[in-house]
Amino acid sequence: MELRIKPKKVLFFNEENFFGIYGVDVNPDDLDKGVKLNQYGNISIKGVMPKLNTMEEYIVTVKPDTQSNYDGSYIVESIKQDKPVTISDQKAFLSTILTSNQIENIFAVYKDGEDIVGMIENGEFDYKSVKGLGDKSFEKLKKKVMDNIDMSEVLAFCNKHKIKYNTIAKLVKEYKNPTIVVDKINQNPYVLTEVPGIGFKKADEIAKAVGYNMTSKNRIDSALRYIISLENMSGHSWISRKPLLNRAIDLLNISKEHIVTVLDNDTKGIKNVDGERYTRDSVYEAEQFVAQRMIQYKTQSKKLFETDELNKFLDEYCEKNNVELEENQRNFFHDWNENNILFLVGGGGMGKQFV
């Protein structure tokens, strides 16, 4: 059911995952919808939501909490906040910031039912004509109005596209301004992959929900980075072109031509090596660093033992243990003797473990 509520008490709120529990009053006009009140004459709501301001009205869609042993317990499915328009709504909104005298003074100047909140938003409100409303009070009022408008837009966006608030809450924290976050998601939903815990598939769900172009460069870029990252996490520093394209076609479900066009035009965050191998920029740079350090170590190599001394040791070892070294195996020890870094490479049964 959809209810208009005003939070009275914060019972619990987790700043990390945005799970909250609130004691709230239900608008009297909504009590005939079959709402069961608790012993305090209100209800409790819980779920993922932004931090709610007490005494501000929100519109929630809730369902009964069947796991609770208490009456009046509900789970939030969606939440939004309407911009106050009527005089009574605006007075209620302004009462959370201003004194009753300041509010009455505002409506003494603006007597014709003007949209005070809208005027503040648009910079049309002349606060200097209002008795008892100074610079500091107005700045506080303006910030409250703008924050309310921004949050209303975010909640409406989440509600429209059935997106959990905590999905974009981390971006709201990062960019500070909720409106900027909504704009960024509309322009490129794959910006969500910048948030830890949100991968390509989740961002792709949201992109589909907002009606984003499924053949866009941003989507293909993000998918290619996702596929290569999976390879990197599996221990592979690169993937060749053909399997990369095949996996991208399966993942994106679009024609190969769209993917090839993006892949061949400097995909963001992806390094193409020799036209055939692809990796993430960060992995390529890490491998370059490792290679440079290995070259540095190799140039600093010193011979540890004289050749005759090493040959004598090997001969004595073979005789004592009744084993025989092939030429390549014996050469390995001489290579080791003269180099700080050495790779022992060979297929199964070649004698690596024995050496």
Image (tube, helix red, strand yellow):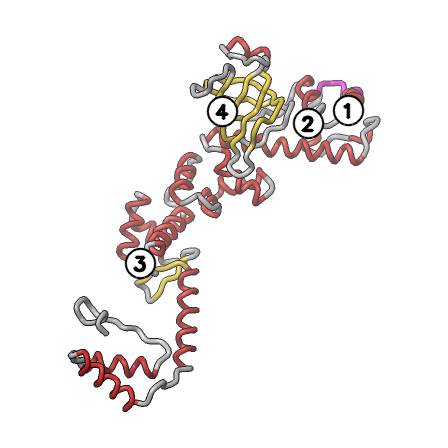
Task: Say how many tags the image has.
Answer: 4
Q: Nearer the viewer, mark 4 or mark 2?
A: 4
Percent from the top left, x then y, of residue 300?
42, 82
- Looking at the image, tell me whether mark 1 or mark 2 is earlier in sequence order: 1
The crowd level at tag 3 (other Cα within 10 Å; few <14, some 14-19, many 20+) is some
Element under disc 3: strand
Magenta span: helix, strand or loop, mainly? loop
The crowd level at tag 2 (other Cα within 10 Å; few <14, some 14-19, many 20+) is many
- Looking at the image, tell me whether mark 1 or mark 4 is earlier in sequence order: 4
Residue 99 shows which numbered tag? 1
Query: Mark 4 is on which residue type?
Result: Val
Percent from the top left, x then y, of residue 115?
68, 24
Query: Mark 2 is on which residue type?
Result: Val
Residue 76 shows which numbered tag? 4
User: Label 2 belongs to which residue?
Assistant: 117
In space, the residues marked 1 and 2 are separated at their CA atoms by 16 Å
* Of residues 133 and 54, the one drawn nearer to the viewer in this rendering: 54
The residue most toward the right is 131
Percent from the top left, x then y, of residue 200?
40, 45
Q: Quadrant of the C terminus?
A: bottom left
Query: Mark 3 is on which residue type?
Result: Ile
Percent from the top left, x then y, of residue 97?
72, 28
Q: Nearer the viewer, mark 2 or mark 3?
A: 3
User: Label 3 belongs to which residue?
Assistant: 239
- Looking at the image, tell me whether mark 4 or mark 2 is earlier in sequence order: 4
In space, the residues marked 4 and 3 are separated at their CA atoms by 44 Å
